[in-house]
Amino acid sequence: MIPKIPSSEITPKSVYLSRRSFIKAAGVVAGSLALAACGVTAPEAEQPTSAAPAAAESKSDEKGNPATSYRDITTYNNYYEFTTDKAGVADLSKNFATRPWEVEVGGLVNRPGTFSVDELVKKFPPEERIYRLRCVEAWSMVIPWMGFPLAGLLNAVEPSSSAKYIRFESIFKPEELPGQKEPWYPWPYQEGLRLDEAMHDLTILATGLYGGELPAQNGGGLRLVVPWKYGFKSIKAIVKIELTAEQPATLWSSIAPNEYGFYANVNPQVDHPRWSQKTERRIGEFSRQATHIFNGYADQVASLYDGMDLAKNY
Amino acid sequence: MRFLVHLAGALPLLWLLFDFFRANLTANPIQAIEQRSGLTAVSFLVASLACTPLAWLSGWKNLTQRRKALGNYGFFYASLHLLTFFILDYALDFAAIWGDVGQKTYILIGASAFLLLLPLAVTSFNFWMKRLGKNWKRLHRLVYLISPLVVLHFFMAKKGDFLRLSGDILQPLAFAALVALLLSLRLPPVKQAILRLKSKLTAGES
């Protein structure tokens, strides 16, 4: 069993190694793991790409976990609309226009409308939210998003009393997103939240990254971020938000309903049927660390699921 | 031909090392090594399976002499795959490995495939070939069981559902099709039909 220790204790900053320095260290010791275990600090900072804002390395989340480098966040992307090769998304999406971007908000609301992202950021000034992102594939990052609470937009369109769920839909343009030509997926990507999850203050619509614009490969023009759920819930390139009375279908639960549920809350006690969710690898770090229930946001969100069997509602 | 096989065997490793030292293995290098060594291993296994049917079809006997080396490279990359998993990914923390994945079917299937491959690699030396005689060939037919297991392991490591043909299944599906083809060509009726067809065609030419 993996002992339940806060991630900050398992991986103190002094042990934290950037990927490059790990590779360098591994090269020096030729496969010996001793060096990593002794806490060798990074001899050289990651080279930021030209687009990376300054002081990128100094950010950390509320638990002191350092933010993943801009380079790693923008070159390691699960975005099957472009390609299943995480390192290939950045290149394939470089001509994808994230501005102007419009999102249609409708369904069971009193004031439906179509909003441009430029309009939205004026109305709801983005703030920085440094969130942990835990992928269902057992890797994780710490990402400094810029965004605004989804609740603000929902309140503005005035949900009717029959609205219980939110359905999100991604852009569908196979000529620009070549992965959408693959017949194995029920495109477009769609996701959903319960209304109370969507109204929670941690739930944001992200418009930026590291203080700059949100790159296409990270879900620009507009993406959802729900930090206590597996990453696939945080749908990218949203063009439609619809309030519904019934629980909406989601892309991954249509592909494999026994493996990907509607809730998809991060939970080390509920394994993926084929692999474990007990541990994760933080991108840029070497050793695995324990995964925490609700991705470490239990204090804020556990009450949303009072009385629910989380193993059944996975 | 022999040289080409060894070149093909060494290149994926050199390429992997090259990318490793250039820090070109994505932001998650351990996973990248795991996936690339696995993909290379299954490619060599399929290549070794392809030798015999290709030799019948082309009449190029030299091919059957290459299948052992190809199979051994498959074993080499499978070992690299396994060692990466145990050492780099889990730092030999066997309690964590057991708690994490020991009870997961896809790991057990992959592990069985490796254990079945082990005696084939050990007996690949000429000493064992001579000593085992006819049994050597029988033993090495285990690869007919190993290759479907490896493909199943590949399917199950991907995000998708192969029974519903949905999700990230294109690569494993391609390997499944190849393995199915290469194994079915060996079925005696299929083999005889092909050889008959071939002799007819060559008779027509002359």
Image (cartoon, coloured by chain):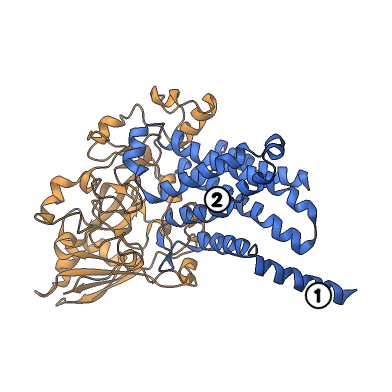
Chain colours: A orange, B blue
Is disc 1 placed on a helix, strand or loop? Answer: helix
Using the rendered image of the protein, determine whether residue A2 is visible from the camera's viewpoint. yes
Amino acid residing under circle 1:
Lys
* Residue A147 place in picture, x, y as percent: 27, 55
Amino acid residing under circle 2:
Leu
Q: Quadrant of the C terminus of chain B?
A: bottom right
Q: What crowding class fits label 1: few (fewer than 14 Cα within 10 Å), some (14-19), or many (20 or more)?
A: few
Q: Which sits earlier in the primary sequence, circle 1 or circle 2?
A: 2
Q: Is residue A296 left or right of residue A215?
A: left
How many numbered discs sit on the rendered protein? Answer: 2
Residue drawn where x is 34% and y is 45% of the image: B103
Chain ID of residue with mark 2: B
Say above or below: A262 vs A174: above
**Are the residues under badges 1 and 2 in a single subunit?**
yes
Residue ID for mark 1? B200
Q: Which residue is nearer to you in this view: B180 or A230?
A: B180
Residue ID for mark 2? B39
Residue drawn where x is 48% and y is 54% of the image: B154
Q: Which residue is nearer to you in this view: B17 or A12?
A: B17
* Residue B98 place in picture, x, y as percent: 34, 38
Say above or below: A22 vs B177: above
Separation of disc 1 and disc 2 at Cα? Answer: 38 Å
Badge nearest the viewer, 1 or 2: 1
